[in-house]
Amino acid sequence: PAYWDLKTSWGQPLHGVIGCRCSGASIAVSRIAGLEDIPVVSMSSSSAQLSDKSDFPSFYRLVGPDNARGQVGALISLLLTFGWDRVSVINTDTQYTKDLATAFGNTWTGDIAHIHTVSIRPDGTVEDTSVDQALDGVPVDDPRVNSRIIVLLAHHQHAYTILQRAQQRKFQPDTVWVGTDGWTGRSFGSDTEWMPDIPGYIGVVPYRNSRDDYDLNNFFYRLQNHQEATSTIVMEELPNYAAETMVDSIVALTMAISSLNPCERADGKKIITALSQTNFTGVSGPVSFTPEGDRANPRYSVLNLPTRGKEWENVGFITPGAIGEGVNALDICWASIGCDQQEAPSDEYPVPPEKLQTWVIAV
């Protein structure tokens, strides 16, 4: 409805659309916009479906897709960087996480010790019995088949319930839980008493520039000057990666339109062509697009939750297909093991040898 209102009631030519944030909304809007040659630039829609130019010819985005070229590829690069080649996978029963699990399964070349889909109730909460089944199915005994690494593919409200349930059941405390941006980096809220002292959770999110980056600092200088001049609240940082990619989405579309002669700026096809050739360094880093309209060479930040009650920490970065760059095990706090470890833990649960019987002879 919002798109159609702009198209029919605004009274001006519609040169392009910034958004949507969620993939489902972008799919709906981009189907219509593509038929009318209206470019759509999303700051965060990551569904791999949107890479199909036959269905979405005018769609572009400032993030990578949820497949080997994007978040799934970054996740696998992270696993391989630490020398892990056997994992368990727990995902929830939502379209987003099922798509992630499918893409992971199609790309991962290592072993999968266990995989389980956790059911979601009609009210949107996870089913406890399904979580218990997922945890009970993880092999923990025989090092030849078990895996200490659990890839958890879930939205944050579901992931936190699963992690809390695992802690309540005293599930293997040295498990390394690995996530995507569905829950990595999100706030757990004020109730974290259930967490272990060192959660050691780790995951990937779209890359965020550091404040010492020239382009980000320059943007903040201009933004804060404007906020002070207009007596509005002065921001010290942007709230999340989507705010940074939102800025660059606007810049990308504006640059594409500005590169055309004024008489050509109502021609959607020419705007789309100009957008496909856009290349600049933005608030979120270098920006250019693949032929599919995805962000070219996407980079992902690696986050770690070192201590209960603390904030997530940025411990490095990872790029899909690149192994061993940008992240060091020494900078990560691992569940049960602790911090400042020279190497990442093994992907196997250590199983103590069976104790021999002891004979006591009383004299």
Image: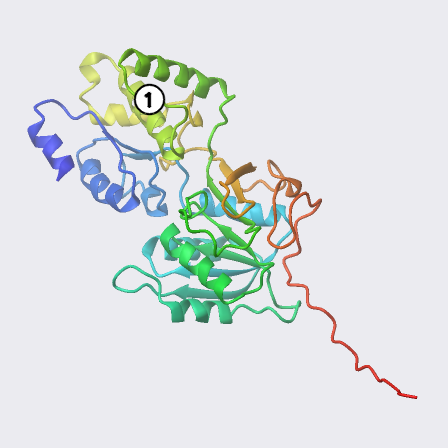
- Camera-nearest residue between 27 and 159: 159
Q: Residue at x 22, y 28 (%)?
A: 16
Residue position for label 1? 251
- Camera-nearest residue between 64 and 223: 223
Q: Residue at x 46, y 32 (%)?
A: 208
> Which quadrant is home to the N terminus?
top left
Relative image position of residue 204 (x, y in whole percent)? 49, 43
> Which quadrant is home to the C terminus?
bottom right
Q: Is residue 3 above or below residue 221?
A: below
Count of marks overlaid on the render:
1
Residue 28 seen in the current view: yes
Q: Is residue 81 above or below residue 217?
A: below
- Camera-nearest residue between 159 and 199: 199
> Is 315 left, or right, of 31 in this rendering?
right
Relative image position of residue 313 (x, y in whole percent)? 53, 38
Residue 319 seen in the current view: no
Report helix, strand or loop for mark 1. Answer: helix
Q: Residues within 10 Å of mark 1 (few under 14, many from 20)?
A: some
Kindly give the residue lying farthest to the right in the view shown.
363
- Residue kind at label 1, given as amino acid type: Val
Relative image position of residue 358 (x, y in whole percent)? 82, 81
Relative image position of residue 41 (x, y in whole percent)? 29, 32
- Camera-nearest residue between 356 and 329: 356
Q: What is the quadrant of residue 172 in the picture?
A: bottom right
Q: What is the quadrant of residue 110 in the picture?
A: bottom right
> Is 298 left, or right, of 77 in this rendering?
left
> Is 14 left, or right, of 39 in this rendering?
left
